[in-house]
């Protein structure tokens, strides 16, 4: 770890952290709070994915949909401009592109196409994560930001191998930042499942897990692939995905420190967050002694 003790962290001229956790446990909230404090550069991996590595895929998908509407098709050549308006807080264009597998008449996309887009996202996420050191340097050299927070996507654990000490992505990240896991409780997980059930959103999955889930769902429901209700499938898969990710997050935490979601939620200032990290570092030092 680049900070071995709470004191080393507190005295560091540059404080650099990467936050990882299940979506909905406060990564973006904390990152935005640190950015608003004025002394932290906020690097959003999902924003980088959507604006740098998947922007053409997203916009081409918009154009394809526009071409199916005669009025828009006639205007699309030189008369209108189609673009993706992704922000840190609104990643809907990226989510819409990823889509949901199943019955096309119910808003789904064929499973093979869904898997193709998942592979695109996996490659994009790895690239965006590996761009983190570049943005640490840019933040310092261009904007004079000493402190840096990387707001990673919830699927980071799906694109790395946390049991491999030579994993190129994790090694590049841990060599440059403090890895910080925001750990939730069983109650948090149930709340996330409840929230997702009310408004299911596209997700990224580890390929083997996705294929097994797709086959198991069809076996359980007796539905053919082209008759699967897209929302029903991703609702059915979501809780299983959280359970699948938990041990991966836990292993990733060995590359850094762990903060509890309730403690993170209670933090209201950059200084409060810095104190929380210092305490976690000291606790880990004592535990390792």
Image (tube, rainbow, N blue to C red):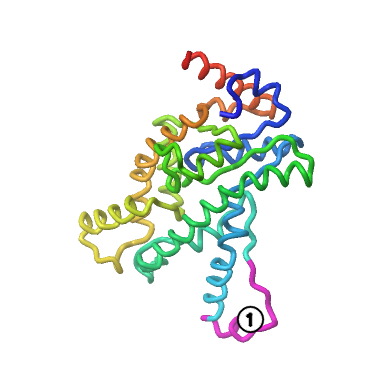
Q: Which SS does the magenta portion mostly show?
A: loop
Q: Specify the segment rendered in magenta.
A: 68-83
236 or 57: which is nearer to us?
57
Identify the residue at horizontal 61%, vertical 41% (top origin).
150
Identify the residue at horizontal 58%, vertical 68% (top origin).
56
Position of 222 compared to 156: left or right? left
Q: Residues within 10 Å of mark 1 (few under 14, many from 20)?
A: some
Identify the residue at horizontal 62%, vertical 36% (top origin).
30
**Is 25 placed above or below 93 here?**
above
Residue 101 covered by magenta stretch: no
- x then y, percent, for residue 175: 57, 36
- x then y, percent, for residue 241: 37, 45
268 or 46: which is nearer to us?
46
269 or 149: which is nearer to us?
149
124 or 164: which is nearer to us?
164
| The N terminus, quarter of image | top right
Position of 253 compared to 212: left or right? right
Position of 95 compared to 103: left or right? right
Identify the residue at horizontal 52%, vertical 27% (top origin).
257
The residue under label 1 is 76
Instruction: Pick out the residue farthest to the front.
Output: 166
- x then y, percent, for residue 45: 58, 49
- x then y, percent, for residue 202: 45, 55
Q: Number of labelled discs? A: 1
Q: Secondary structure at mark 1?
A: loop
Residue 70 covered by magenta stretch: yes
């Amino acid at each position: 770890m680049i900070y071995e003790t709470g004191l080393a962290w507190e005295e560091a001229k540059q404080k650099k952290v990467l936050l990882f956790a299940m979506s909905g446990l406060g990564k973006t909230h904390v990152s935005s709070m640190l950015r608003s404090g004025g002394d932290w550069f906020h690097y959003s991996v999902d924003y980088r994915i959507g604006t740098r590595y998947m922007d053409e895929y997203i916009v081409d998908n918009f154009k394809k949909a526009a071409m199916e509407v005669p009025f828009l098709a006639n205007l699309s050549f030189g008369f209108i401009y189609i673009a993706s308006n992704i922000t840190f807080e609104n990643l809907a264009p990226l989510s819409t592109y990823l889509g949901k597998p199943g019955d096309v008449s119910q808003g789904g996309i064929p499973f093979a196409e869904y898997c193709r887009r998942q592979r695109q996202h996996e490659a994009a996420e790895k690239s965006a994560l590996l761009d983190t050191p570049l943005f640490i340097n840019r933040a310092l050299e261009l904007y004079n930001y000493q402190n840096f927070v990387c707001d990673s996507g919830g699927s980071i654990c799906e694109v790395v191998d946390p049991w491999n000490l030579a994993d190129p992505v994790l090694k590049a990240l841990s060599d440059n930042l403090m890895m910080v896991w925001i750990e939730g409780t069983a109650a948090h997980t149930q709340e996330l499942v409840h929230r997702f059930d009310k408004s299911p959103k596209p997700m990224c999955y580890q390929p083997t897990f996705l294929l097994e889930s797709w086959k198991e769902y069809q076996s359980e429901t007796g539905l053919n692939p082209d008759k699967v209700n897209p929302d029903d499938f991703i609702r059915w898969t979501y809780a299983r995905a959280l359970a699948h990710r938990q041990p991966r997050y836990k292993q990733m935490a060995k590359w850094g420190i762990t903060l509890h979601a309730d403690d993170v939620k209670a933090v209201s200032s950059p200084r409060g967050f810095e104190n929380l990290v210092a305490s976690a570092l000291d606790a880990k030092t004592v535990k390792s002694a």
